[in-house]
Amino acid sequence: MSRPSRTAALVALCAAMLMIVLDGSIVTVALPAIQSDLRFSASNLTWTVNSYMIAFGGLLLLAGRLGDLVGRKRMFVAGLAVFTVASLLCGVSTGQDMLIAARFVQGVGGAMTSAVSLGMIVTHFPEPRERGRAIGAYAFVGAAGASIGQVLGGVLTEAVSWHWIFFINLPIGAAAALLAVRVLEPDQGLGLRAGADLPGALLVTAGLMLGVYTIVETSRYGWGSAHTLGYGALALMLLAGFVVRQATAAAPLLPLEIFRSRTVAGANAVQVLMVSALFGFQILIALYLQQVRGYGAAGTGLAMLPAALAIATVSLVLSARLNARFGEHRVLLAGIALLVVGIGLLTRLPVHAGYAVDLLPTMLLAGGFGLATSALTTLGMSGAGAGDAGLVSGLFNTSQQVGGALGVAVLSTFAAARTRGLTGAGHDRATALTGGFHVAFGIGAGLLVAALVLTAAVLRRPPVPVAEEQARPEEAPAPSPAA
């Protein structure tokens, strides 16, 4: 495959990723407008986000495996088509049920597309250095897209209406699908006879969906409620049944041998911790700006713009070079360390915060996510071969979605509890909300510290960059002193 063809393929993959990531964050800024227009209650409003996350997180593993079997290109294009049509349905929704159902279908399409994207990068860019650059560009789209989504969502909501946050997906989805059909290399896949493991697929999909549902509903029922404990136990039973099935099936959906790679297993664990902190931060800082500081939708988006620019600059300009020079392990440590400092600063955020003094430093330090996500993605895909690239990609994206759902549930639940306690003690609304956010940001910083420790302990890498290490010829052993 020629260099221009590979570049065009990367553009198609990144365009699809950008659309999906934008959609995951663009809705958060528009939630008040959606609530007012469609008359959502506070509890039902969360399902405009939760229905998407449940479908997305629950179907990633199955979509990744099916991509390996029927062909990743087919799965990718089909997912784009489903996502684009669902975006149209979201945009024309006139009622609560229609919007929630369309968001669920969006999650299905997003899972189909995202599950095979990283695997296609692995197969289209076999040379280590080019693969590193490609993953850096892809990671930039994922990292910066979330912040860009908030900016775009605020502008579109105030300038036109919330419907356009979904309509904007139509030209992007159509262009990405047409480009993908033309430039992505066709692959036949292993064939369904290689084993789709339907019982395993049902167990893991039901377990993940129920688990994500349980997590996101803790904001309503609490962590110690019968609802949370009962559904959580059932989800664990389904996932335990999946593990047993994978250990005994002739053609397992997720061969357990993949977790023998300390790098792959460790990278997914680090991602859960890191994304939990960062996704929770993204939601909560937007709420702080609107509920405490009185920002509008567009103002909130613009306030987040420096974070997007910092992530973009680091991802596109620095990450690939630093990975090649110092190795992914060191770059990942540096990136997480910057995030620890950035989120930690927010634990002292005052009620009447000045943007330049109290918020801008954190927005700039968010550039550490551009370093961390590129290095972590490379490590997470390092164990993928031609026959299981889609599966490893699906696993990596699954850990990302589970981390996002977990982070929002944990951080928002503890923030709400602290806010209620301060309100009951007689504090005004702004002070109580800010106190709740302090607790949430402190938990987020703790999750990042845990990710830093796990990276240092589990993802140790040799100081020689991976690309140079693979290209270096094997040296003969040095002669012993006796010789």
Image (cartoon, rainbow, N blue to C red):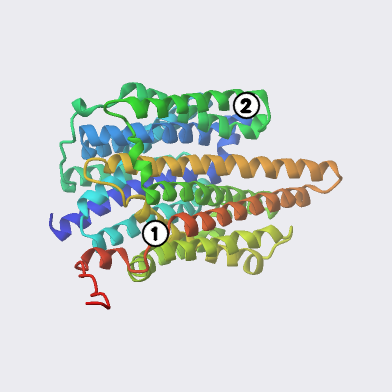
Instruction: Please state the horizontal and vertical placement of residue 312, each as a whole percent of the image.
Output: 42, 62
| Camera-nearest residue between 141 and 375 | 375
Can residue 307 be seen at all in this image of the molecule? yes
Instruction: Please state the horizontal and vertical placement of residue 449, each as a whole percent of the image.
Output: 58, 57
Relative to 446, residue 357 above or below? below
Quadrant in which the C terminus is drawn: bottom left
Secondary structure state at the residue bearing disc 2: helix
Give the residue type that dot 1 points to: Ala
Characterize the local packing of mark 1: few (<14), some (14-19) or many (20 or more) Cα atoms within 10 angstroms.
many
Q: Are marks 1 and 2 in contact (CB under 8 Å)?
A: no
Characterize the local packing of mark 2: few (<14), some (14-19) or many (20 or more) Cα atoms within 10 angstroms.
some
Q: Earlier in the sequence, mark 1 or mark 2?
A: 2
Query: Residues under labels 1 and 2: Cα distance?
Result: 36 Å
Give the residue type that dot 2 points to: Leu
Relative to 475, residue 286 above or below? above
Can residue 349 be seen at all in this image of the molecule? no
| Camera-nearest residue between 347 and 177 | 347
Residue sitting farthest toward the right:
426
Mark drawn on residue 375? 1
Q: Residue at x 31, y 25 (%)?
A: 249
Instruction: Please state the horizontal and vertical placement of residue 335, each as a whole percent of the image.
Output: 48, 63
59 relative to 475 in the view: left or right: right
Quadrant in which the N terminus is drawn: bottom left
Mark drawn on residue 229? 2
Mark drawn on residue 190? none
Secondary structure state at the residue bearing disc 1: helix
Q: Residue at x 34, y 59 (%)?
A: 136
228 relative to 67 in the view: left or right: right
Instruction: Please state the horizontal and vertical placement of residue 409, each as a whole percent of the image.
Output: 60, 39
